[in-house]
Amino acid sequence: MSAQPTLTLPMQSIASSEPRAKEVLEKALKQVGFIPNMYGYMVNSPALLDTYLFGYNQFRTESGLNPAEQEVVFLTISRENACHYCVAAHSLIADAFSKVPLDVTDAIRNGTEIPDTKLKALSHFTKVLLDSRGHPCKTEVAAFIAAGYTEAHVLSILLAISVKTLSNYANHLFETPLDDMFKPREWSPTRTGSACGSKECAA
């Protein structure tokens, strides 16, 4: 992570935001019950947060994956994208609400072998889809289906990647501070520094 955030737009609240942003934050409050710090930054572009909320809800309700599987997908994407905020947040959700076994959550966080055959296949294929930029080989798809999933689940993972890219990248730009509720599952990526390669970023 960078020492300082790349963007300096302020964190918004329902009280401080303009009408369009306020509308989206009120939608977020209704959907998740509170306004995470991440949303307060993302809503500086109301369309960004609104798109995220819609896609997130669609994945939760229509992916065909159970809550534990959904968290495995979200956690895997967030770890691969080195998002300190989303790994912590989804770790807590996995532990407290989605009933993901702790050893599975920790294995994803640590990049070690997942001790559940089906969830391991799900996490692995999620990484394959990310790493291949949507070009998994037929062998990988066949192995994923053999593990108990379907071709429709491939598209559901694609939706999750799209959704998490929005939040992961926003958190990179803002260095979003963790909400207190997520701090018990704080996580730091092993990858550091900027990807842009310029002298300014390397300094």
Image: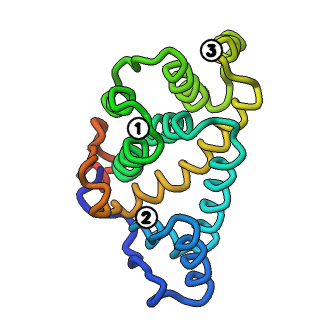
| Of residues 149 and 10, the one drawn nearer to the viewer in this rendering | 149
Q: What mark, if any, has residue 147 been given in the picture?
A: 3
Q: Nearer the viewer, mark 2 or mark 3?
A: 3
Which of the numbered marks, if any, corresponds to residue 38?
2
Of residues 33 and 145, the one nearer the viewer is 33
In terms of depth relative to the viewer, which is nearer, 87 or 69?
69
Check disc 1 and report its element: helix, strand or loop: helix
**Colour mode?**
rainbow
Give how far apart the Cα atoms at labels 2 and 3 are.
34 Å
Callout 3 environment at 10 Å: few (<14), some (14 to 19), or many (20+)? some
User: Along the polypeptide, which appears first: circle 2 or circle 1?
Assistant: 2
Discs 2, 1 touching: Cβ within 8 Å: no
Residue beneath the point at 28% across and 46% down: 185
Q: At numbered mark 3, what does the secondary structure look like: helix, strand or loop? A: loop
Going by the numbered disc 2, the residue's amino acid type is: Met
Q: Which quadrant holds residue 116?
A: top left
Residue 197 visible in the displayed image: no
Residue type highlighted by circle 3: Ala
> What residue lies at 39% left-to-right and 51% top-to-bottom?
89
Of residues 168 and 96, the one drawn nearer to the viewer in this rendering: 96
Please provide percent x and percent y for residue 82. Answer: 38, 42
Report the residue at 61% width, 54% height from top. Answer: 56
Q: CA distance from mark 2 to mark 1?
A: 17 Å
Q: Is residue 86 visible?
A: yes
Location of residue 123 with respect to 53 vertically, above or below = above
